[in-house]
């Protein structure tokens, strides 16, 4: 994000978003409400993360798996249009821009994701699979690291 561009605004609380680099990706974080804005395909890229260790617990993810819902009634931080729609990935609810394809994940949804990931790390969980390779696999430790970003 260039300094000549106007500051992006949080779609939830209207606070300015702060840019942070995470695994080489520039993310937009709200330090007030703790949500995160991902530009188009950034969510997939960040979740794929650095090369995984063999046999990492993984879950499948593709941004096209976000099920669209109704209008979210929020403005997109990137294109500044009222084009955010509700989207869900499992029990995690997000907002996806119909125009630029960016994704907003609120602090509440990040907490839900944290809970899902904790259950995936449990050896008793039937949801986790061991894989060595494959498209759109998400390393749980990368997700947990993302959720620990401080403002």
Image (cartoon, helix red, strand yellow):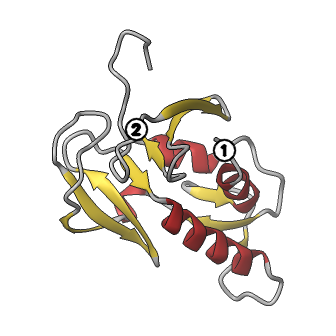
Q: Earlier in the sequence, mark 1 or mark 2?
A: 2
Identify the residue at image location x=66%, y=44%.
49
Please tell me which residue lies in front, 48 or 38: 38
Query: Which percent across, then down, holds residue 91?
Result: 46, 78
Classify mark 2: helix, strand or loop: loop
Identify the residue at image location x=17%, y=49%.
83
Please tell me which residue lies in front, 4 or 96: 4
Compute the Cα span from label 1 to label 2.
Answer: 16 Å
Identify the residue at image location x=52%, y=32%.
18
Classify mark 1: helix, strand or loop: loop
Query: Which percent across, then down, holds residue 150?
Result: 69, 44
| In the rendered image, the vertical position of residue 61 relative to residue 145, given as above or below | below
Q: Tell me: 64 left or right of 89.
A: left
Q: Which residue is mark 2?
A: 39
Q: Tell me: 120 left or right of 81.
A: right
Cβ atoms at labels 1 and 2 below 8 Å apart = no
Query: Which percent across, then down, holds residue 141?
Result: 76, 57
Q: Tell me: 58 left or right of 31.
A: right
Q: Which residue is mark 1?
A: 49
Please tell me which residue lies in front, 147 or 11: 11
């Amino acid at each position: 994000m260039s300094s000549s561009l106007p500051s992006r605004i949080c779609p939830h609380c209207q606070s300015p978003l702060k840019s942070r680099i995470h695994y080489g990706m520039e993310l937009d974080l709200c330090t007030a409400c703790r949500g995160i804005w991902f530009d188009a395909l950034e969510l997939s890229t960040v979740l794929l993360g650095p090369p995984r260790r063999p046999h990492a617990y993984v879950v499948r993810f593709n941004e096209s798996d976000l099920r669209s819902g109704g209008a979210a009634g929020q403005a997109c931080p990137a294109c500044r249009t009222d084009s955010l729609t509700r989207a869900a990935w499992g029990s995690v609810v997000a907002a996806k821009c119909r125009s630029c394809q960016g994704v907003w994940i609120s602090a509440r949804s990040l907490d839900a994701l944290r809970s899902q990931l904790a259950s995936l790390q449990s050896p008793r969980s039937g949801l986790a699979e061991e894989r060595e390779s494959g498209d759109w696999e998400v390393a749980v430790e990368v997700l947990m690291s993302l959720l620990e970003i401080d403002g």
